[in-house]
């Protein structure tokens, strides 16, 4: 069982580490852009807009549509900034404390979101890898298929042998 002095030292260390959370979140950034390349946004994890770029072609676009596009891209950038902040906090404080912060804030890391694409399974990855690395199928015929137009053509890179 830890002594009172050890418990006090642990509490002070945690307090100092938690004090860094706000600065880590302010350092975290997230960027996103519209698929058509007309809007680019960068935000920090505290919600501050750090940069906004709009394509000149948007001057002729419907202002309501432009506003919706900016908001959607900003939401995506904010998700990235939130994840970046949790990644930074986890490196500093550990995964358990980061998970606790997620629970207390009510804002889970985007990578843990229920609707997030989980990616492919290990089995699917291995199957696709095996297909990519498999040697190409060899032909058993020693002559290429006959084609009257191509009879005079010879390709030195051809796999055909006599």
Image (tube, rainbow, N blue to C red):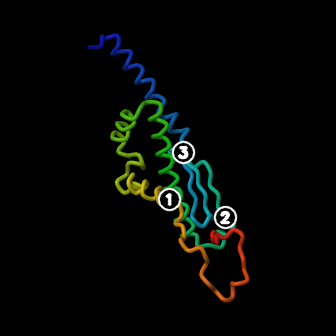
The furthest residue to the bottom:
148
The relative height of residue 157 versus residue 45 in the rendered view (above or below) is: below
Q: Nearer the viewer, residue 44 or 157?
A: 157
- Picture coordinates of residue 65, whole percent (x, y): 54, 70
Q: On residue 23, which mark appears?
A: none
Question: Within 10 Å of the Cα at label 2, are there few (<14), some (14-19), or many (20+) other Cα atoms?
Answer: few
Left or right, 146 with respect to 17, comes to right
Q: Which residue is mark 3?
A: 44
Residue 138 on image: x %, y %: 54, 67
Between 122 and 141, the one lying in front of the other is 141
Please name the residue that numbered disc 2 is placed on: 55
Number of other residues with Cα within 10 Å of mark 3, as a class: few under 14, some 14 to 19, many 20 or more: many
Q: Earlier in the sequence, mark 1 or mark 2?
A: 2
Instruction: Please tell me whether mark 1 or mark 2 is closer to you in this view.
Output: 1
Q: Position of residue 74 (x, y in %)?
A: 53, 56
Would you place residue 59 above or below residue 129 in this image? below
Label 1 packing within 10 angstroms: few (<14), some (14-19), many (20+): few
Examine the image and state in which quarter residue 148 appears.
bottom right
Label 1 or label 3, whichever comes before in sequence order: 3
Number of numbered labels in the structure image: 3
In the image, what residue occupies the spot 34% across and 36% down?
A: 100
Report helix, strand or loop for mark 1: loop
Q: Are marks 1 and 2 in contact (CB under 8 Å)?
A: no
Distance, label 1 to label 2, CA atoms, is: 45 Å
- Relative to residue 103, is residue 42 drawn left or right? right
Which mark sits nearer the N-terminus, 3 or 2?
3
Where 125 falls versus 14 (above or below)?
A: below
Reading the image, the residue beneath label 1 is: 134
Q: Quadrant of the C terminus?
A: bottom right
């Amino acid at each position: 069982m830890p002594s009172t002095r050890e418990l006090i030292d642990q509490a002070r260390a945690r307090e100092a580490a938690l004090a860094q959370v706000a600065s880590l979140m302010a350092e975290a950034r997230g960027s996103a852009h519209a698929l058509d390349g007309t809007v680019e946004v960068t935000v920090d994890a505290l919600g501050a807009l750090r940069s906004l770029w709009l394509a000149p072609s948007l001057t002729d676009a419907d202002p309501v549509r432009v506003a919706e596009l900016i908001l959607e891209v900003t939401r995506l950038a904010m998700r990235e900034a939130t994840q970046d902040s949790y990644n930074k906090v986890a490196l500093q404080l550990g995964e358990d404390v980061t998970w606790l912060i997620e629970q207390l804030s009510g804002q889970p890391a985007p990578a843990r979101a229920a609707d997030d694409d989980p990616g492919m399974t290990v089995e699917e990855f291995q199957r696709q890898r095996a297909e990519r690395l498999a040697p190409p199928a060899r032909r058993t015929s020693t002559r290429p298929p006959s084609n009257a137009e191509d009879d005079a053509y010879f390709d030195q890179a051809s796999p055909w042998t006599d």
